[in-house]
Image (spheres, coloured by chain):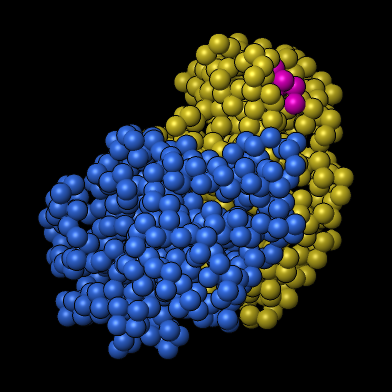
Chain colours: A yellow, B blue
Amino acid sequence: MKNFVYSIPTKVYFGKGQLDNLGAELSSYGKNVLLTYGGGSIKKNGVYDKIMEQIRKYDLNVFELSGIDPNPRITSVKEGARICKENNVDVVLAAGGGSTIDCSKFICANAADDVEDPWDYFIGKAKVTKALPLVSILTLSATGSEMDCGGVLTNIETREKLGSGNPILRPKASFLDPTITYSVSKYQTACGTADIFSHICEVYFNLGSDFYMLRRFMEGMFKTLVKYGPIAVEEPENYEARANLMWTSSWAINDFIKCGDGIPWSCHPIEHELSAFYDITHGLGLAILTPRWMEYCLNEKTVDTYVEFGTNVFDIDPYLDKFEIAKKAIARTYDFLFNQLKLTDTLTKVGIKEEDFEKMAENACRNGGAIDGFVRLEKDDVVNILKMCK
Amino acid sequence: MKNFVYSIPTKVYFGKGQLDNLGAELSSYGKNVLLTYGGGSIKKNGVYDKIMEQIRKYDLNVFELSGIDPNPRITSVKEGARICKENNVDVVLAAGGGSTIDCSKFICANAADDVEDPWDYFIGKAKVTKALPLVSILTLSATGSEMDCGGVLTNIETREKLGSGNPILRPKASFLDPTITYSVSKYQTACGTADIFSHICEVYFNLGSDFYMLRRFMEGMFKTLVKYGPIAVEEPENYEARANLMWTSSWAINDFIKCGDGIPWSCHPIEHELSAFYDITHGLGLAILTPRWMEYCLNEKTVDTYVEFGTNVFDIDPYLDKFEIAKKAIARTYDFLFNQLKLTDTLTKVGIKEEDFEKMAENACRNGGAIDGFVRLEKDDVVNILKMCK
C-alpha cells in the first residue's frame, strides 16, 4: 500500500428536508450569496423556492447566475467571477448536478484571484491559490462533484474539455436530499449511474490489490449501483434507491478510494473527447466506452483483476476458468448498462462518426502521447476501442 | 434511510515515514506542545526520538505527560489540563493507542475551559464546549480514537468506566504509520482486532437494511479483519496486514458507518463493566462477549441479519436453512476470535468471578434500566450472557 494523505472535510447534510439547515450554513460565511444553477429544473422541483425561503429567513442577499450548461463552459466561470467581484459575494451556492458544481468551483477560485482568463487553470498557465467558500445542493447523482475537489470545463472555441482541481475547491458543505432527485428523468438517472460506475472502474482496475479494505468497499459500491440503478430508473420516487445512489456518487470519487494521486484514468480522457466534439451526455459516453475498454484490456497479465471483479460484484462462480469469469463479468457489465439501465449502446446511434475517431484519439493521448492507466493506451489503441463502440 | 450529518475533517497522514510531516503539522497550531503517552513503548520503538527530531527541527517547545494507563484514569486528564494551562500549550500531541488518545481529548477540553472536575463531562454535570487542537500518532490499531470524537475514561474511586464525546474533540490530524505497530505484541494485536470487529458488529447488527452501501462496506471491513488479523498475529512485520488493520480501525468507528446518532451499542456497555471491575484489556472482554451476545440474540425476528452477515462475510452457502447459516456464522466468529486470533475464550480464565455478574449487569443497564440495542437486554439478560461466557 502506497502512502497517502486523507483529508475530506466537506460537511454533508444527508436526507429528506435537510435544506432546512441551508440558511444557517450559508450565513456562517457571510451575507452575500451567489446562487448558480443550470437550465431551471430547480424552479420546477421546488428547490429554488426552498432556497429563497432560507435566504429570506436568514436575511441574506442573493445574486444569480443561471444557464450553466450540462457540459459547462469556461465563459460561465468568467461571468460568475465577475458577479462575485462586483457584489462582494461571500459564498457561492451551487444548486445542480456536476456541471453546475464543477463550474462553481472555478467561479470560487476566479472570484478570489486576479487570473484574467480562467481557462489558464486548465492549460497549466495559472494555478488555483485561493477560493471563496462553496456550498452545494445536489440535484443529480453522478459526478460526485459535491464532495470532490475537481471539475471539468469546456472551451467551445478551442473544442477542448479539460479537468483541473485543487483541495481548496472542495465544497465546504453539501446538501444531499434524495427526494430532490425524484424528478430526474429515467435517461439522466441511467447516465448518472453509469458515470458513478465508471468512476469506480477507473480506480478499481488500477489500484493495488494490497488495498484490500478499499477494494471491498469499491465492490460494495458496484453492487449498490447494480441493485439500485435499475430500480431508480423504474421507480423514480423510490427513496432507498435514490439515497443509496446519491451516497455512492459522493464516495466513488471524493478521493477516499483512490488514496492520493497517481491513479491515472482511462475511459474518462477518451469520453471527454466524445463530449467535447459532440456535446453528448458524459455518463452515456462512459457507458458506451467502459465495457469495450474492459474487453480491450483483458489479457494474461490483467485477468486476475477481472476475476476479482466478477466473483465479488456479480457473484460469478469462482471455480470457472479465469478467462471465462472475466468474459462473464464483461457480459454482466454490458447487460447492466444497456439492458438494465436501458442506455444506448453504440456511438453510431448517438451520431458520432468514425471520421472523427483519429482526431479524438489523438487529443485523448495529448499528455505524453498515451493514456497510461490500467493498460497503457496509445493513439491506435484508442482508435481500436472507439471502433469497437461503433 | 434515516437522515444524518456527515462531518469527519480529521486529516490522516497514512503510511511509512509520514512522521516526517509531524513538525509542519504541529507548528500550524503554535509553538507549545503537550506530548502525552503511556507506559513508554514509544521510547523503545523509535517514535519518541522521531517526535523529538521534528520538535527540534521546527523549534517547538514540548511538555510531557507520560504514564497514561491502558484503561485511562480521569486523574490523568486533570494532570494534563493543569500542564496545558500552566504552560500556554497550543496543541496536544497524543502518541499511543486509544487510551492515550481518548484521555488526551479530554485534556484538550479541560485545558480550554474552567470545569473543575473533568469527570463531570462523563456524568452529565458539565459539557465540552471548547478544546485545544489534538494531533495523534497511532501506535495500536484498535479503538479508532484517532479519527472519532469520543473517549472512555475510568474513575477508579467510583469503579466507573464511562464514555463521552463531542465533535470538537475529533483529532485535527492523525499519523497512521503501520510500521509503528510492528512492535505490538501478538496478544495486543489480537485484542485490537477483536475491538475493531466489535465496533462493526455494534453497528452492523443494528443499522437498517436500507443502508445498503454501508452494509457492504461493513462486510468489507469484517473480511479485512478476518483475513489480516491472524496474519498480523503470526507475522508482526507484514506491512499489508498492519496497514489494512490500521485503516479499518479508523473507519469502523469514525461515525461514517453509523450515520449520526441513535445506534445504541450492546457489547460495549457490558464490557466496560468487566474492565471497570477487573481492569482487563477492553478488546479481550469484547472478544469473550461478542459471540455469546450473538447467540443470545438469535431468534426468528433477528435471524435475517445473521444470514446477511454469514453469507457476505464468511461466504456461507446462502441456500442452507437460515438458522443453520446463522449458527455457522456464529461458529465462524468463535473460530476467528479464539482459534485464529488465539484469544482467551472465557471469563473464568481471565479471573472474572460469577459473584460479580449481578452487580456488573446492573451497572451495564444503568441508563434506563436496560441496554436498548440490537435486541433489548435487561439486567437478567446481561447476567445470562455473562454466564454463557463463564
**Picture coordinates of residue A58, whole percent (x, y):** 63, 80
Q: In the rendered view, does B88 fall on the left or right side of B240?
A: left
In the image as oriented, which residue stretches furthest toward the right?
A234
Q: Nearer the viewer, residue B64 or A205?
A: B64
State which region is magenta.
A326-332
User: Is residue A330 in the magenta section?
Assistant: yes
- Residue A387 visible (yes or no): yes
**Picture coordinates of residue B364, whole percent (x, y):** 49, 75
Residue at the location (41% across, 86% down)? B126
Q: How many marks?
A: 0
Question: Compared with residue A54, is residue A302 higher up or lower down, i.e. above or below?
Answer: above
Question: Compared with residue A28, is residue B142 higher up or lower down, i.e. above or below?
Answer: above
- Residue A138 visible (yes or no): no
User: Is residue A100 in the magenta section?
Assistant: no
Q: In the rendered view, does B2 fall on the left or right side of A350?
A: left
Residue at the location (15% across, 53% down)? B43
